Amino acid sequence: MDIAALEQSLAEDLACLGLPMEPWVISREGVKDVVVIGGGMTGLSVAAALRLHGVANLSVLDRSPAGQEGPWVTTARMHTLRTAKVATGPALGIAALTYRRWHEARYGKASWNALERIDRQDWMAYLVWYRRVMAVPVENGAEVARIVPQPDGTIVLHVVRDGEGAQLRTRHLVLATGFDGFGGPAFPPFLRGLGRHLWRHTAEEIDFAALKGRRIGVVGFGASALDNASTALEAGAASVDFFVRRTDLPAVQKLAPLRGAGFSCGYPDLPDEWKLRLSGYEMRTQNPPPRHSIVRLLRHERLRLHLGCPVEAAREEGGAIVLATQRGEHGVDFLILATGFDQKADARPELAEILPHIRLWKDAHPEAAGHPLAASPYLDAGFAFQEKVPGACPSLRNIYCPTDASILSKGRLAVGVGNLSDATMTILRRIASSLFVEDRAAYFRLAEQNERREFDMAELAHIIA
């Protein structure tokens, strides 16, 4: 089967499922029914599901060029996805839409059988194909600068395209903005005063070719730390030193037994105290880097691992960096920060006008204010924000947050490839329900006005007693 045959098979599968449905939403002039911010994996999945189920008046906005949405060919530095190859991602329960079918059509079944993990470049190519065959209306080069809630529950977006601003009104908004969607990269305080040319975060673009022959320092030892270090060494870096706060390294993924439908479906329904308990335990124990990242790193010899060695200060000296730690000073030429992300939504200017109204976990549970994820939004069952003060910002019930900020509320449903379709269908059901319930009177009028006859009484005249 080649790609053309796969697309024919997909068309037949969709026809058997009665998809896409006829549009049914009573749209309002000049108003989108749904806008999705982010044209990466999650945004494509949500938009495709909506379109398949008759919500056609929608737009997807992404600030990146076409083919560069998400991290896969920009800031991701692993060779392969970390998820098992059998994960179905955005396939929405449709076999012909899975990565496996795409891979087999492109490379053959023998290649799939021999595959250990999915190449990230191939994953991006699959998402480009997915966007095309599902006719997802992504507008690239469009950045949302402001999200302005309206008294009627709609949302006005201030969108910048090629330096020109415009407004777009929508009834529902999906923030499919990834790991930095409710905050941004975490920058340690010791960076203050250190020239920007001397360091980058793993979530940023890095010119690895420029690191050839240079001494690299890496803060952290998680998956992204290892992948960036390996990339630097493969580009010819002279050496890599890891600086790690912990005195030992986590080698066991403690929550690994909590997998399958029980955990993915059950976590969102857990009592809050159990969500706090499980997520807190995972944060304390931490997940180890995946085995294939360790194997890739250990192919190199120019490595040093400094445990129990947090960086306390840094200064520029002679064009290099001197790092002050509890175990003395260390010199490097360039520093890579694998320090994760902060959920500090005040760093996102587009959220400024809704953030004061969003109920956070620390609002719902003041006693848990010290929890690492306490600043996460306290999402409802459909991934939507809730109001801190009921009635103060009705638009929040129509804004959905399937980003990493949803982890405490919803588990990892919307984070990564594994359970993405489940998260998508949850959001789809919530939006479809809301669109219908909100306009229930208008739909009832359509029923009252419907005069389409299935038969005429004259047809029954000869059998009427």
Image (cartoon, grey):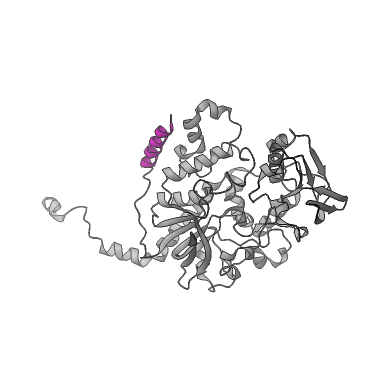
Q: Quadrant of residue 226?
A: top right
Relative to 124, is 320 on the left or the right? right
Please name the residue shown 74% across and 41% down the image: 252
Magenta segment range?
1-27
Q: Is residue 225 above or below residue 186?
A: above
Please name the residue shown 39% across and 57% down the image: 57
Question: Quick one: which residue is furthest to the front in this view?
Answer: 318
User: Where does the image place residue 74, in percent across and percent down from the top left?
Assistant: 59, 46
User: Where does the image place residue 84, in percent across and percent down from the top left?
Assistant: 60, 37
Residue closest to the eye, 379 or 334: 334
Q: Is residue 23 above or below residue 226?
A: below
Look at the image and tell me whether residue 37 can be seen: yes
Please name the residue shown 61% across and 40% down the image: 81
User: Where does the image place residue 298, in percent across and percent down from the top left?
Assistant: 75, 34
User: Where does the image place residue 317, in percent across and percent down from the top left?
Assistant: 81, 54
Please name the residue shown 76% across and 41% down the image: 251
Q: How many marks?
A: 0
